[in-house]
Image: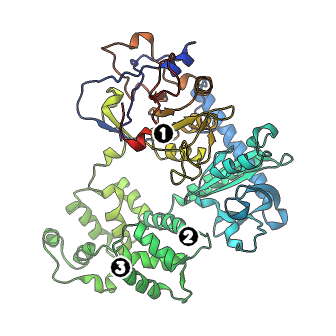
Amino acid sequence: RAPRGALPSSSCSLRREPPSEAIDWILVGNPRRIQTPGPRPHTLRTPQRSRRKEGGALHAGLSREGAIMAAQVEASDAEAAKAMLIAEASGHANAKELVRISQGGFWRGQPLRREFWLEEADGHWHLHWATQSLFKKDSDAIVNLAHVTRVMHGQHTSAFSIAGSSRGSLSAEDGATDRSLSLVCENGRSLDMVVPEDGNFSMWFDGLKALIAEARQAREGEDQMTRFLKAQWRIADVNGDNSLSVNEVLKLVAKMNLNHEPKYVRKLISEVDLDRSGELSFDEFTRLMATLTARPELWPIWRCLLEDEPSAYEEMLTSEPASDPSSDAALREELLPFDKFELFVELVQGEQIDEATMEMLDICGYQRGEDVSYATFVNFVSHKGNEFANPETAAVYQDMTMPLSNYFVASSHNTYLEGDQLRSNSSVNRYIDDLCKGCRCVELDCWDGDTEPVIYHGHTLTSKISFRDVISAIDRWAFEVSDYPVILSLENHCSIPQQQKMAEYMTAIFGDKLAMPLPTDIGPDARLPSPEDLKHKIVIKGKVNKLSEAPAAAAYEEDEDDDGEKD
């Protein structure tokens, strides 16, 4: 949805340094909405990757040669940390003691000392830890590093928030925050750890990052369908036991919008469950999905390519098949000579077999010099390179030089919540998640804390997180996947003294990334800057009172987004 409320007006010329009156501007602002003429709004999408990475090769203030040298040093350090981690923590005999933050049960939020070690299996590194629970299996205490999407430094997850509120030992005073890290997995779960004071934090943090990057690179060599099925498998395998129960499969099928009756799916599960264990291995799951995701409309095309001459291709595409050949299992096993496949690409697809097409075939499982299998054919036709949509629209292709108010913006509501709006956990990690998924507008519900402003769903049982921690996380992750601006939608319920702290934190942490208006930008003819002008900028959006008004005045409506649009 398009962000509501007023944006401070500013022209395309932005200050590089916040002015001395920056704090006053954040408190007072310019609540007038600026209307700008123009065509129908565009959609502000964020598919392009940013060059600004943590420890990346592009370092501010360095020349290209200097940046390359810095990147080489960082890569060398990462490799050294990885080698050290494997040498010192590989195998149960070399287990190292870390603190793990429990995420469930009686010990939820408690820091528990556990032994951690690495083991390599099936070509992947796994992080194990010893569990003392009578109800947990050994398989519940393993994380496959190939399933980890990112490694975060600090205490950003809800588990850390719970631990921080109940255990004073996990605070910044004793340096625990600087020794904390979280592994966030594809299924959204995290493994949260603290390295003891006498431990080697760099070895764990940099070493795990290097192993995860290595695993991600190895997975890129897999064909498209295998990667897709493995991703679905990891999401469905909630307990991490490397098998799927019948109920887990049924939930996954429903989530994938495969319109099959549960009775039919159960029947297929019993057919592919060769060992009659009642659970599916990945190979069995692959066979099941091959049946559930079969595209019967491709069978007559495949049969025509095998049996008919090219002159019959046009009729093949414009007529219904006399019978459904999907029952002929032998067709699956036949191979199509490559010269016939080349004719199909030229006559039906209207393309040529060039190196780009060959690379697409490689991804689809084709072995160069061999004939084409039915699976490769299906993968090729289903590949994103053959989608009906123009592939150029996968990148930014619209005019991004118009005023910001001319665009729809990918926005997040109650960004901080991990669950319902009444009693769920709040976490900094939710902001990181949404920013890494391309969201460009996040919401901050700000309230007075004991001494510092906090973020939570006011007047509810949801947990509270530090405003400063959220701002720090946004500063680090705002431009991870896009160069375009991030809008902070502030729902401000704070008193003036804590608003002043909010302003101090934003100006100090964001620095010159904070978009500031010039005095000459405010007026009846002012126009908002464009997304192109605001690249790598953070924009503050929110309603404000005049300083002469009480902070608890009626302008601060309780959770306006829930009660309707109010201006």
- Residue 77 x, y percent position in the rendering: 72, 43
- Which of the numbered marks, if any, corresponds to residue 261? 3
The reply to whether dot 3 and dot 2 touch (C-beta < 8 Å) is no
Q: Which amino acid does label 1 sit on?
A: Val
Q: Distance between the residues labelled 3 and 2?
A: 21 Å
User: What is the distance, in whole Å, between disc 1 and disc 2 at their CAs?
Assistant: 30 Å
Mark positioned earlier in the residue sequence (1 or 3): 3
Which residue position holds label 1?
Answer: 442
Q: Is residue 451 left or right of residue 541?
A: right
Q: Which of 499 and 402 is in front in this view?
A: 499
Q: Which of 480 and 136 is in front in this view?
A: 136
Disc 1 to disc 2: CB gap under 8 Å: no
User: Quick check: 246 above or below 144?
Assistant: below
Q: Where is residue 503 in the image (x, y as percent from the top left)?
A: 58, 24
**Figure disc tally:** 3
Crowd around label 2: few <14 · some 14–19 · many ≥20 (10 Å)? some
Q: Residue at x 68, y 66 (%)?
A: 142
Q: In this view, does 433 lie above or below 36?
A: below
Please tell me how crowded label 3 is: few (under 14), some (14-19), or many (20+) other residues with Cα within 10 Å: few
Which mark, residue 521? Answer: none
Tell me which residue sits at (72%, 63%) in the image: 106
